[in-house]
Amino acid sequence: MSEAPEVGLVWGVKASFLNYLAHTGDATTSVIGAAAPTTTGRFYFGPDAAQIVDPTAETMTLKFCGEVQFLAHHGVLRVEICDPWVTFSGSGSYLSIAIPNTQGTRIPLASLEFAPPSVTEGVAMWSALPTRLTAEGIAIFDGFYSEGESFDPVTIRALTG
Ligand code: HEM
């Protein structure tokens, strides 16, 4: 998959985590459903149905689908990034993920700073928004990272109608 301006969300999660996995010796990365690897080693998540955004809104939730599953240490390490959504709101913006095999439970994984999108030819783009681990996300990485740990920037593209 290229980095062409396709509607969806692209995130590398955290470069040092992917580098760590590569050195465990037995790590596997599975991309499932609407997720796909990008040519630059990041992950693409497809848009949820026919999502249309108002690029002038300051409060919204952008929904994306697909799952990336990391396994290592003979299954002891299992990290699943499933159906990432980005919520922008005045009281705090964050990327949330679904917890697989639950009845739709989601947790905020990474906080981010709101920035207005650029809009070109009907596509709103939030480019390389910095992300940081939330308190709720600490358990996903088994406590190896603290709250506020810097994660990779996320880029989002959505149709404006
Ligand atoms: C058999 C069990 C495990 C062993 C032997 C192990 C071993 C290690 C070692 C040696 C490091 C330091 C690597 C370095 O500094 O380059 C490390 C870092 C780390 N481990 Fe594990 N680990 C295990 C389980 C887990 C589990 C269950 C998770 C859950 C996600 C996890 C997530 C991490 C993370 C996030 C780091 C930091 C990576 C970074 O540098 O960004 N590990 N682990």
Image: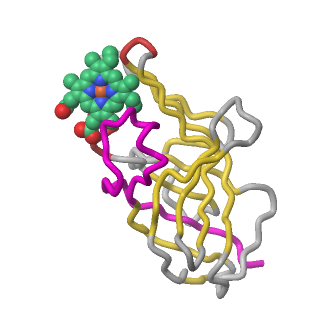
Residue 141 covered by magenta stretch: yes
Q: Quadrant of residue 58?
A: bottom right
Ligand 1 quadrant in view: top left
* Rendered residue at 42%/49% (across/down): 12
**Image coloring type:** secondary structure
Instruction: Tell me residue 118's x, y (percent).
Output: 54, 83
Q: Within the image, what quadrant is residue 151 found in? A: bottom left
Q: Is residue 60 left or right of residue 108?
A: right
Front residue of this view, candidates 63 and 110: 110
In this rendering, the answer to whether 13 lies above or below 54 is above
For residue 159, side relative to residue 31 (left or right) = right
The residue sitting at 35% across, 36% down in the picture is 143
Q: Tell which of 96 and 47 is nearer to you.
A: 96
The reply, left or right, for residue 61 in relation to residue 92 is right
- Total label count? 0
Residue 64 visible in the shown view: yes
In the image, residue 124 lies at what x, y percent? 61, 77
Inspect this view and state whether residue 22 appears.
no
Q: Is residue 77 magenta?
A: no
Q: Which span of residues is magenta-colored?
A: 132-161
User: Residue 150, percent across and down?
Assistant: 31, 56
At which x and y percent is residue 100?
A: 65, 33
Residue closest to the eye, 75 or 125 = 75
The residue located at (49%, 48%) in the rendering is 136
Which image quadrant for residue 23?
top left
Q: In front: 38, or 93?
A: 93
- Residue most extreme to the right: 50
* Residue 51 position (above or below residue 145): below
- The C terminus is located in which quarter? bottom right
Q: Is residue 125 above or below residue 78?
A: below
Farthest residue in the top direction?
74
Q: Residue furthest bottom?
A: 56
